[in-house]
C-alpha cells in the first residue's frame, strides 16, 4: 500500500518521543471512510458481545462501561482497520521492528454519565507476552475532552512491572501477592509523575507502550466515548505460559506454542 512507501517520513521526533515517554498522540491517522467503517464495527460488536465481554461499571452507575476483546475474526470491519490501514506501519516504526504481528483488539465504551474510572495500570502484566517491542493504539470515534481522555505517565514503560489487580476489587488474580512492585500513589503525589493527556477528535489516536501506566476517568452527561484499541507486537515478542488465566485469555494456545516461542499462530497474524 502507498502508506508503506511513506513510513520513512514519519516524524523522527515522534519516534523519539515514543521511545522516551512511552506514549505519543497521533493526529488524523484514520480517514473519514475508515472512521465510518470502524463505527460500524463497534456498533456490530456492541450488538453481538462475545463471551469475553464485561460490564466494568456498577449496577447503580447512571452510565455503563462495556469492554470486549478479541472479536476481529468475526468482525470484518475490525479486521480491515487492524490490517489494511496505516496502523501496522505506524506500529512498525514506533516499535523500531522489522516485523509486526496483530496481538488483539479491545473495545472500551463509556456511555454518557458513566462514573466508572479505569484505575492506573499497565497492560503487559495481564498478558501472555514478553518483550519490549509493543504498541497499543487508543482510537476514539467520538470527540474526547481532556476530562475523559486517556492519561499516561511519561517514562513509566522503563522496565518495572507493577502488580496487576482487578479494577474494582483490587485483587491479585494473576501474579502472586508480593511478587511484583506495588503501584505508586500517582494521584496522591502528582508532582512526582508527569502526566500526558490530549483532547482527541475522531481520526486521532494515542499510541503507547504496553508497560506505560495509564488510566481514564468517567464520562460527563451527554458525552458518549466509544474507543477501539488495536495492539501489535514486534520482533522480540515471545509467548509466556502463565499458570493463570490471562486477560484476555487465548484458550488452547499453550497446546500450540511453547513457552518462549515466537507468537507464530493464526491468532496473531504477521502483517509486516
Image (cartoon, rainbow, N blue to C red):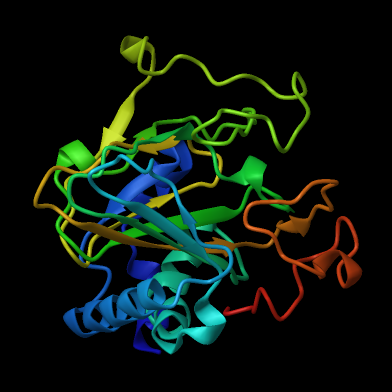
Give the x, y percent position of residue 146. Answer: 17, 40
Q: Name the one closer to the observer, 108 or 210.
A: 108
Which residue is rendered at x = 32% and y = 14% of the image?
190
Q: Indicate left or right for 51 with 257 as reference.
A: left
Give the x, y percent position of residue 121. Answer: 50, 34
Q: Name the one closer to the observer, 179 or 28.
A: 179
Give the x, y percent position of residue 76. Answer: 44, 89
> Where, quadrant-wise, is the N terminus in this rendering?
bottom left
Give the x, y percent position of residue 172. Answer: 68, 30
Q: Is residue 41 above or below residue 176?
A: below
Q: Is residue 141 above or below residue 269?
A: above
Q: Indicate left or right for 76 with 159 as reference.
A: left
Which residue is at the far front?
60
Q: Indicate left or right for 171 with 105 as reference.
A: right
Q: Give the quarter of the image for residue 47.
A: bottom left
> Where, quadrant-wise, is the C terminus in this rendering?
bottom right
> Total label count?
0
Q: Name the one closer to the observer, 209 or 235.
A: 209
Q: Is residue 146 above or below residue 228?
A: above
Which residue is rendered at x = 22% and y = 67% of the image?
203
Which residue is rendered at x = 73% and y = 53% of the image?
128
Which residue is rendered at x = 21% and y = 85% of the image?
33
Amino acid at each position: 500500500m502507498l502508506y508503506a512507501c511513506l513510513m520513512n517520513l514519519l516524524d523522527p521526533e515522534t519516534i523519539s518521543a515514543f521511545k522516551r515517554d512511552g506514549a505519543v498522540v497521533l493526529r488524523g491517522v484514520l480517514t473519514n471512510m475508515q472512521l465510518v467503517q470502524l463505527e460500524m464495527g463497534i456498533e456490530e460488536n456492541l450488538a453481538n458481545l462475545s463471551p469475553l465481554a464485561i460490564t466494568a461499571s456498577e449496577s447503580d452507575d447512571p452510565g455503563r462501561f462495556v469492554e470486549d476483546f478479541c472479536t476481529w475474526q468475526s468482525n470484518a470491519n475490525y479486521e480491515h482497520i487492524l490490517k489494511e490501514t496505516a496502523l501496522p506501519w505506524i506500529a512498525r516504526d514506533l516499535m523500531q521492528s522489522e516485523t509486526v504481528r496483530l496481538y488483539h483488539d479491545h473495545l472500551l465504551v463509556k456511555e454518557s454519565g458513566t462514573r466508572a474510572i479505569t484505575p492506573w495500570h499497565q497492560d503487559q502484566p495481564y498478558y501472555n507476552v514478553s518483550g519490549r517491542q509493543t504498541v497499543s493504539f487508543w482510537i476514539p470515534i467520538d470527540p474526547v475532552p481532556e476530562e475523559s481522555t486517556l492519561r499516561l505517565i511519561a517514562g513509566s514503560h522503563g522496565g518495572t512491572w507493577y502488580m496487576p489487580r482487578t479494577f474494582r476489587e483490587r485483587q491479585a488474580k494473576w501474579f502472586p501477592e508480593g511478587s511484583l512492585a506495588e503501584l505508586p500513589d500517582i494521584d496522591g503525589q502528582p508532582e512526582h509523575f508527569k502526566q500526558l493527556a490530549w483532547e482527541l477528535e475522531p481520526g486521532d489516536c494515542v499510541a503507547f507502550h504496553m508497560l506505560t501506566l495509564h488510566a481514564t476517568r468517567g464520562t460527563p452527561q451527554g458525552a458518549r466515548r466509544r474507543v477501539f484499541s488495536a495492539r501489535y507486537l514486534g520482533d522480540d515478542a515471545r509467548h509466556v505460559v502463565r499458570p493463570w488465566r490471562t486477560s484476555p485469555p487465548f484458550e488452547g494456545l499453550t497446546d500450540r506454542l511453547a513457552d518462549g516461542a515466537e507468537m507464530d499462530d493464526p491468532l496473531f497474524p504477521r502483517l509486516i
